[in-house]
Amino acid sequence: MSAMGDPALERHFKGHRDTVTSVDFSCNMKQIASGSLDSCVMIWNMKPQMRAYRFVGHKDAVMSVQFSPSGHLVASASRDKTVRLWVPSVKGESTVFRAHTGSVRSVSFSSDGQSLVTASDDKTIKVWAVHRQKFLFSLSQHINWVRSAKFSPDGRLIVSASDDKTVKIWDKNSRECIHSFYEHGGFVNYADFHPSGTCIAAASNDNTVKVWDIRSNKLLQQYQVHSAAVNSLSFHPSGNFLITASNDSTLKILDLVEGRLLYTLHGHQGAATCAVFSRKGDFFASGGADEQVMAWRTNFASVDYGEVLRSQTLLAGENGTSSRSAHTSSQTQSRLQPSGTTTVKSSSDRLTSRGTSGLRLGPARGSSDLLMPDDQEEEVEEEQWHEPPLAPSAAAREEAIPPALASTLENIVVQLDVLTQLNSYPTVRTATSKLSW
């Protein structure tokens, strides 16, 4: 673990044979579920040398996966127009139901685990009773494919995102659309509720992430930090951070309280398609077009950035504005005021670094992979990540930097170049301003 509060790659998993479309953690952090265009669901174990499972049952790409709140079920949505509920064990038992007349893009549990909401290319959102797999009702006001649908934390509202460029808020009880947001200029790929339930965020093909207050229906923040479509996002459980995944191959960590970009992570080769925080926020996972699932230790959520930012501001003043990073020199630094919208922009960079750092790092160090033995038929050959300590470059040591700040920035996460080999896995087949929260 990095002592300086930087995100660190903890594990990575390779077994899918096509783009990873969705990832999720179990509530006890023992497993990660992933779905892929290869039509399979994988269940990965966080402990080294523990077997993983490949679930085969869908007849087309798996677009979305999610653990139930209890962790006893995994739901998957597919282009084959079905939803499956799996038991995440070696038997891989599942039930299947024909959910829509088009590809199912999204599946999500309510916080009590009693309901499911699905979104589809048939332009509808449907709500289901989990234990009976019973259809309850449909929501039908979108005029193009619906990419995403999520329950609010209290289960009373649903947010949906669509290729009609809108984000809609629905009342579950009245089954009415109570508001539509039209600010995005492209397809809206993903939307979700802030943990408080008072705000939503959405990711779009227009390269932006937008945050609205659903009490006032006002746009609070917009982040223009990606150079390509934003595919997915996830709120940290504290509500203070947001992670985004983009076709520009990066993950971005955003500080919602300060309205600033904190980190850019270059772990995936090719598009980063999905990202999610764990239930407690101490880890996050990501997936991409490189067919990999990565599990990261968060670390940064426990850091008091106030002191770090004050130190960096002082350093910038001493060394001149040229020492400021690409992120800080191009984004709005002021806190969001309730009466307006904060827009945060970022110029392109190729480093994995703090968004507020005033230093440029040297070349990324190489990474090593350790292959675990395949001791039994069901044991999965997995790769364990060992991250070498990062020594400061000679140029960095020569900078006139206060020792405290130098130690803070010394262990910043470097660009990841993950070299992996395709492993074999047991296959399980089935018959059936300050934001005011």
Image (cartoon, grey):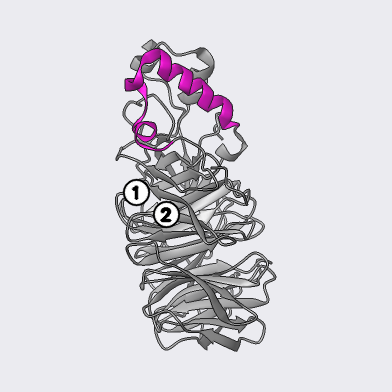
Give, as a three-letter code, the residue at label 2. Val
In the image, 223: left or right of 115? left
Q: Please provide percent x and percent y for residue 78.
A: 43, 77
Q: Is residue 330 magenta?
A: yes
Q: Which residue is mark 2?
A: 209
Give the quadrant of residue 187.
bottom left
Instruction: Rate crowding at label 2 as few (under 14), some (14 to 19) or many (20 or more) other CA atoms within 10 Å.
Output: many
Left-right relation of 367 to 90:
left
The residue where tag 1 is placed is 226
Q: What residue is shown at x 65% (from left), y 71% (from top)?
A: 155
Is residue 423 among the parts visible in the rendering? no
Q: Which mark is residue 89?
A: none
Q: Nearer the viewer, residue 250 or 58?
A: 250
Q: Is residue 436 above or below residue 180?
A: above
Which marked residue is nearer to the observer: mark 1 or mark 2?
2
* Quadrant into which the N terminus falls: top right
Tell which residue pokes out farthest to the front in this image. Answer: 339
